[in-house]
Image (cartoon, rainbow, N blue to C red):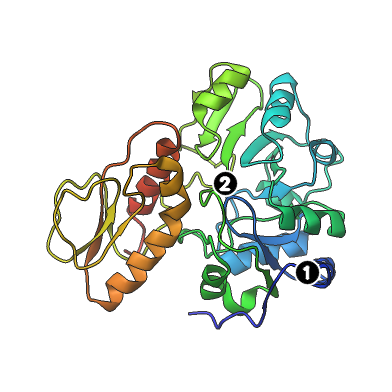
Amino acid sequence: MSKPASRILPPTDAAIAEAAALLGAGALVALPTETVYGLAGDATSDLAVAAIFAAKERPQFNPLIAHYPSAGEAARDVTFDEKASELARRFWPGPLTLVLPRRADCRVSLLASAGLDSQAVRVPRHEVAQRLLAKFGKPLAAPSANRSGRISPTQPSHVAEELGERVALILDGGPCKIGIESTVVALLGGGPLLLRPGAVTEEEIEAAIGPIAHAGEGGQPRGPGMLASHYAPDLPLRLDARELREGEALLGFGPLTIGEAKLAINLSPRGDLEEAAAQLFAALRRLDRQGRKQGLTGIAAMPIPERGLGRAINDRLRRAAAPRSGR
């Protein structure tokens, strides 16, 4: 376990200035976004991007998202077609990532693109992220601030638990409002592809630009969050549970009708998908930590409706439940 980070600071002007100075010196800073906390580094620096991969213990074939204060700034590094421009107009700033062709003079480290000719870009909505981007003046590579494959952080304490001294400073923006990562759409010719479902739903995307295809998982990932095993707790996760088994903690949704568990968290007793998405990663983290302390052997997740945000929640749960090497 990493040692706790030395400092978690409220996002005062002085803290933002210090964070920007640390980033300029090649250090890593954790920042809040509306989705999850990000582990930020200078996206234009090969060394800083390499430090992100090292801190997360992340496979270097898994691309990183570059964050910008505006679509205009992102357009300096990637090429927008008509559909990409429409998605940016409708959903930026916000929880949507676009994977677009890199420009020949793209400032972002090729390591952040995992050597591909495309780059994932996003304009976050969170006020603290916007302030830091404005102060720093360059794009920030900022994947989720956790070790690779682990549960994404939605509170500053989660970042400290996961990364400790690997991050120089954590800016405290409170709990993330959405709590689930951005939707990822690739527009690289041949029609738009949904690489990862998220807070911007498939229905909203299709209303903006028409039909969108679903990407398979074969080959090298074009965007983040495409590895089969991801967001994983240490305890095995069993999906679509309609009964409890001995030794299982319960991840519930709606009325708890499958029996009483020694340890249970209900993502939304009223069956609200937005509430469930915001609670998901914190709930998984708590069930995993407390369940291991209590000697439990697994986590049973009740079914989540496969509609709207439910698709994104189920995507994360399926990846969290996928077999992992060494498990």
Label 1 Cα crowd, 10 Å radius (few <14 / some 14-19 / many 20+): few
Q: Position of residue 280 (x, y in %)?
A: 42, 53
Q: Residue at x 80, y 41 (%)?
A: 70
Residue displayed at 84% across by 68% down:
17
Task: Choose top left, top right, bottom left or bottom right for residue 5.
Answer: bottom right
Nearest the camera: 162 or 177? 177
Viewer-nearest residue: 76 or 30: 30
Asked whether residue 191 appears in the rendered view, the answer is no
Report the amino acid beneath label 2: Pro
Q: Which residue is mark 1?
A: 12
Secondary structure under the numbered disc 2 in the rendered image: loop
Say which amino acid is labelled 1: Thr
Using the rendered image of the protein, determine whether residue 60 is visible from the camera's viewpoint: yes
Report the residue that reaches farthest toward the top: 210
Q: Residues within 10 Å of mark 2 (few under 14, many from 20)?
A: many
Above or below, comparing residue 186 to residue 257 in the picture: above
Up-down: is 201 above or below 120?
above
**Circle 2 is placed at which residue position?**
224
Q: Callout 1: helix, strand or loop?
A: loop
Residue 53 drawn at (x, y percent):
62, 62
Image location (x, y in percent) of residue 80: 76, 28
From mark 1 to mark 2, how far is it between C-alphas? Answer: 30 Å
